[in-house]
């Protein structure tokens, strides 16, 4: 059973409702956040050159720093590579370009974070789910991986956490993991 009701994340059903009520480019931003776990500054800084189309991965090279209004190194100061889920890869392929920001305004300016916050608020209201922030999309990504039984080390790498202790915040979401561990002791 999903234990996200008490947690910061949202359930798969709520994800579907949220996506169904997001408009235009915002749906693509929210889908990407849910399927990659990118931080909001990383979403804003994402460029077409960060996509490896052959390997179906994206490389997190930058994060947008709101204070300086410019690109900066990602948190933990290291690049990371994230395999793209089929739905995200297909969505990006449909509007593939060679240069610029992936999520840009009509004037080719980077994504407006305040606009994303507003869209999330409106989409949640339209969907009839509790209001969430962009960080909840990241938490949902991690929570869904834990519930599905992904190794914590893999989740740590995907999230770009410096230590596995940071990732352990999500470990309590997988109650079946204790049963699975004990089952390993049972004879076949």
Image (cartoon, rainbow, N blue to C red):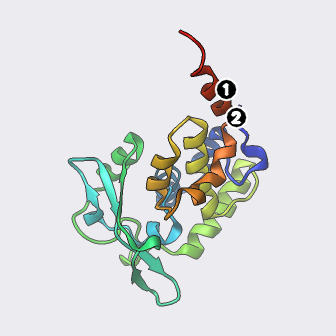
Q: Is residue 55 left or right of residue 144?
A: left
Quarter assignment of residue 50: bottom left
Residue named by callout 1: 179
Residue at left offset 40%, top offset 74%: 77
Instruction: List x then y, in percent, for residue 130.
Output: 76, 54
The residue nearer to you, when weighing 13 against 71, is 71
Quarter assignment of residue 81: bottom left
For mark 2, give the secondary structure.
loop
Question: Image quadrant for the N terminus?
Answer: top right
The residue nearer to you, when weighing 10 against 94, is 10
Residue at left offset 37%, top offset 69%: 78
Marks 2 & 1, CB-CB < 8 Å contact: yes
- Residue furthest to the top in view is 188
Residue named by callout 2: 175
Instruction: List x then y, in percent, for residue 162.
Output: 49, 65
Badge 1: residue crowd in 10 Å (few <14, some 14–19, many ≥20): few
Real-space Cα distance between discs 2 and 1? 8 Å
Per the rendering, the mark at residue 45 is none
Residue at left offset 45%, top offset 54%: 158
Task: Give the number of the mark in front: 2 or 1.
Answer: 1
The mark total stands at: 2
Instruction: List x then y, in percent, for residue 113.
Output: 55, 74
Badge 2: residue crowd in 10 Å (few <14, some 14–19, many ≥20): some
- Residue furthest to the bottom in view is 68
Q: Is residue 176 left or right of residue 158?
A: right
Instruction: List x then y, in percent, for residue 175.
Output: 70, 34
């Amino acid at each position: 059973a999903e234990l996200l009701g008490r947690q910061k994340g949202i359930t798969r059903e709520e994800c579907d409702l949220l996506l169904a009520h997001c408009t235009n480019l915002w749906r693509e931003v929210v889908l990407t956040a849910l399927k990659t776990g990118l931080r909001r500054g990383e979403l804003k800084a994402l460029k077409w050159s960060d996509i490896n189309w052959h390997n179906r991965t994206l490389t997190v090279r930058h994060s947008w720093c709101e204070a300086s209004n410019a690109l900066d190194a990602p948190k933990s100061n290291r690049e990371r590579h994230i395999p793209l889920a089929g739905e995200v890869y297909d969505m990006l392929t449909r509007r593939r370009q060679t240069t610029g920001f992936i999520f840009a305004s009509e004037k080719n300016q980077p994504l407006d974070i305040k606009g994303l916050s507003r869209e999330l608020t409106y989409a949640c209201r339209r969907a009839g789910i509790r209001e969430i922030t962009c960080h909840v999309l990241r938490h949902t990504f991690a929570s869904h991986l834990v519930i599905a039984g992904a190794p914590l080390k893999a989740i740590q790498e995907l999230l770009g956490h410096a230590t596995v202790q940071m990732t352990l915040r999500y470990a309590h979401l997988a109650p079946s993991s204790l049963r699975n561990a004990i089952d390993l002791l049972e004879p076949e």
